[in-house]
Amino acid sequence: MKKLLIIAIIVILFCASCQQKNSDSSKVNVSSYAQQLFESKNAYIGDASANGKVLNLLNIADELGSYSVELKTDEMPYWIKLNFESHISDRDTFDLKILDKAFLILALIDNVNEVQCSYPYTEDGKDTLITVYVTQKQATDTLGKDIKSFAESEEGIQELMNQLNK
């Protein structure tokens, strides 16, 4: 009887150990960058200095070029618009980079509903202004999860970055 009890205890301890290892492996390893982004999250699009902190942390100017910012805060939908100054030569690559940044902006600024990005582009010898629109709904539909929910924790921000391959 004592042997059976000892074996049962060993099995229980072994199972508990396996369960602990499984729960640890499901945790997301959070980078210091994800922590910084989480700390920079902003409740209101109207807070220009907080927006600037988010945009600076996202390295938008370094990665995509110089830009100015417009905000629409008087009625919903609230949006932030990045107006890039330089002509873009590879529109597809630029648009993919914009999409990643837009998803992060939508997650990190609580009440922003849309991110717009405009940039000059020459097509067939004609200069044109391209504007890309990324809505909260589009981001949520693309990711299969409410974009705003990623900003509830550092792990959520890291999960979003992992999905975006950042």
Image (cartoon, rainbow, N blue to C red):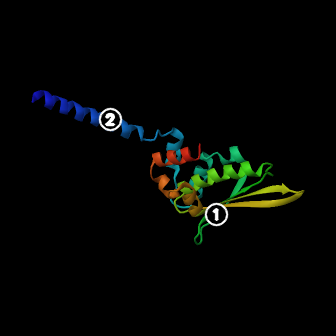
Residue occupied by mark 1: 71
The residue sitting at the top extreme is 3
Dot 1: what SS?
A: strand
Distance between the alpha carbons at the discs numbered 2 and 1: 51 Å
The residue sitting at the right extreme is 125
The residue sitting at the left extreme is 1
Residue 19 percent location from the top left of the image: 32, 38
Front-most of 162 and 12?
Answer: 12
Q: Which mark is residue 54?
A: none
Asked if residue 49 shows in the view, the reply is no
Q: Amino acid at mark 2?
A: Cys
Whether residues under marks 2 and 1 lie with C-beta atoms below 8 angstroms apart, the answer is no
Residue drawn 28% across the image and 36% down it: 15
Residue 109 percent location from the top left of the image: 54, 57
Q: Quadrant of residue 134?
A: bottom right
Dot 2: what SS?
A: helix
Please tell me how many numbered marks the rendered image carries.
2
Image position of 41 with respect to 22: above or below:
below
Q: Amino acid at mark 1?
A: Leu
Residue occupied by mark 2: 18
Q: Badge 2 local density, few (<14 within 10 Å), some, or many (20+)?
A: few
Left/right placement of residue 91 relative to residue 105 reads: right
Image position of 82 with respect to 61: above or below:
below
